[in-house]
Image (cartoon, helix red, strand yellow):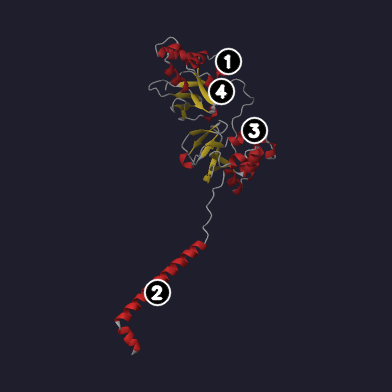
């Protein structure tokens, strides 16, 4: 009776409904607070800190590379996150075993320090070059201004010459200061048998390239090729300049407008060392002339260069690999036209 009366009383029913609503709200708030507390009690996972190139080398058991870097005093270079970024082509331990066998040494510690330094820097390019950026016959300068050529035919490979290459077996190991690609061979640069003492300008003068020397002087480029920056110069002979003047209906180099002369001369120069053994058929060589290029043509033992001027005959390479203290010179029998 009493319960029936309570339930039938409108005032009592209204109070009971309000009580239920408040109870439900309090339970919801309690559950929310409990949930927040659990989230606060669970620590957030620590942020993933990318490893440096040196750390990746250690973590991936590139023991021989780490030993070589340590001996050459280069560990700090690739451990420093403020340096670089770098692209490193990292040889495997087996690749270093093969290198020691080729050089006739039993341990990395026996390799002369200057050779080891050159070899290690020959595996490094400034900046990040991921596998997606590699293209057929791409040429890139290394830290020592030697150049590497890449090919994608039959799998990605990096070439030191037309006959020496290493396969890229693993790509794009991303580091905080660059990227690593794994290769199956240690690359050795084309080092001179003796240290050259003449710069590019001295080589031109010593070998009787009088017209080239006059042209460089008039164009204000002598100091450029007397410096320490490494270049490869395709140097036209005196007869090549005589033929150019004839084509232009001029009698002296001084009659060529300076801007034209600068364009022509810089079109014969590419950054870094590019040796004759690195040239392949249909290879495009980029130049200092605002990124323009000329094309290499190889027919048997004959090597020629195709310039950008429509209808112009190719220039033949008559002498190769004349070393200078700041680069290398190849002799050609025609002036290239951009």
Q: Residue 57, how many percent across, how many down?
A: 59, 45
Distance from the alpha carbon under mark 3 to that under mark 2: 82 Å
Estimate the spatial distance between the alpha carbons at disc 4 and disc 3, rounded to whole Å: 23 Å
Do tag 2 and tag 1 residues touch (Cβ < 8 Å)? no
Q: Which residue is drawn at the image coordinates 32% and 84% (left, top)?
A: 7
Q: Mark 4 or 1 closer to N-term?
A: 1
Which callout, 3 or 2, points to the residue nearer the camera?
Answer: 2
Earlier along the polypeptide chain: callout 2 or callout 4?
Answer: 2
Q: Which label belongs to residue 115?
A: 3
Q: Are marks 3 and 2 in contact (CB under 8 Å)?
A: no
Residue 185 seen anywhere in this rendered image of the structure: no
Residue behind mark 1:
206
Q: Nearer the viewer, mark 2 or mark 4?
A: 2
| Residue position marked by numbered label 4 in the rendering | 227
Determine crowd level at label 3: few under 14, some 14-19, many 20+ residues with C-alpha closer than 10 A. few
Q: Quadrant of the N terminus?
A: bottom left
Q: Secondary structure at mark 3?
A: helix
Q: Secondary structure at mark 2?
A: helix
Q: Earlier in the sequence, mark 1 or mark 3?
A: 3
Residues tagged 1 and 3 counted as in contact (Cβ below 8 A): no
Name the secondary structure under disc 1. Answer: helix
User: Among all residues in the image, which is located at the extreme bottom?
Assistant: 1
Foreground mark, 4 or 1, reads: 4
Q: Earlier in the sequence, mark 3 or mark 2?
A: 2
Between disc 4 and disc 3, the foreground one is 4
**Secondary structure beneath label 4:** loop
């Amino acid at each position: 009776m009493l319960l029936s009366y309570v339930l039938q009383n409108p005032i009592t029913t209204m109070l009971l409904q309000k009580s239920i609503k408040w109870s439900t709200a309090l339970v919801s708030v309690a559950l929310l607070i409990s949930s927040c507390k659990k989230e606060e009690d669970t620590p957030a996972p620590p942020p993933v800190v990318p490893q440096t190139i040196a750390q990746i080398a250690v973590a991936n058991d590139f023991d021989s590379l780490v030993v070589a870097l340590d001996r050459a005093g280069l560990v700090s270079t690739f451990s420093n996150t403020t340096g670089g970024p770098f692209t490193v082509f990292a040889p495997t331990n087996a690749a270093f075993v093969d290198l020691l066998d080729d050089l006739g040494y039993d341990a990395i510690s026996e390799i002369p320090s200057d050779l080891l330094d050159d070899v290690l820097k020959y595996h490094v390019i400034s900046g990040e070059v991921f596998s997606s950026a590699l293209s057929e016959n791409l040429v890139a300068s290394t830290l020592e201004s030697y150049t590497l050529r890449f090919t994608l035919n039959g799998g990605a490979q990096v070439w030191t010459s037309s006959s020496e290459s290493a396969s890229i077996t693993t790509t794009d190991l991303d580091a905080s200061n660059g990227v690593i690609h794994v290769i199956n061979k240690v690359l050795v640069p084309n080092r001179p048998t003796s240290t050259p003492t003449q710069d590019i300008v001295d080589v031109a003068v010593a070998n009787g390239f009088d017209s080239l020397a006059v042209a460089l002087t008039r164009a204000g480029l002598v100091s450029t090729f007397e410096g320490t920056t490494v270049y490869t110069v395709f140097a036209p002979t005196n007869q090549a300049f005589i033929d150019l003047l004839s084509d232009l209906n001029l009698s002296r180099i001084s009659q060529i407008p300076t801007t034209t002369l600068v364009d022509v001369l810089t079109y014969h120069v590419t950054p870094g060392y590019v040796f004759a053994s690195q040239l392949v058929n249909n290879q495009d060589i980029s130049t200092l002339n605002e990124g323009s290029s000329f094309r290499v043509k190889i027919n048997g033992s004959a090597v020629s260069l195709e310039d950008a001027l429509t209808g112009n005959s190719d220039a033949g390479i008559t002498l190769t690999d004349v070393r200078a203290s700041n680069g290398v010179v190849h002799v050609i029998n025609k002036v290239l036209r951009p």
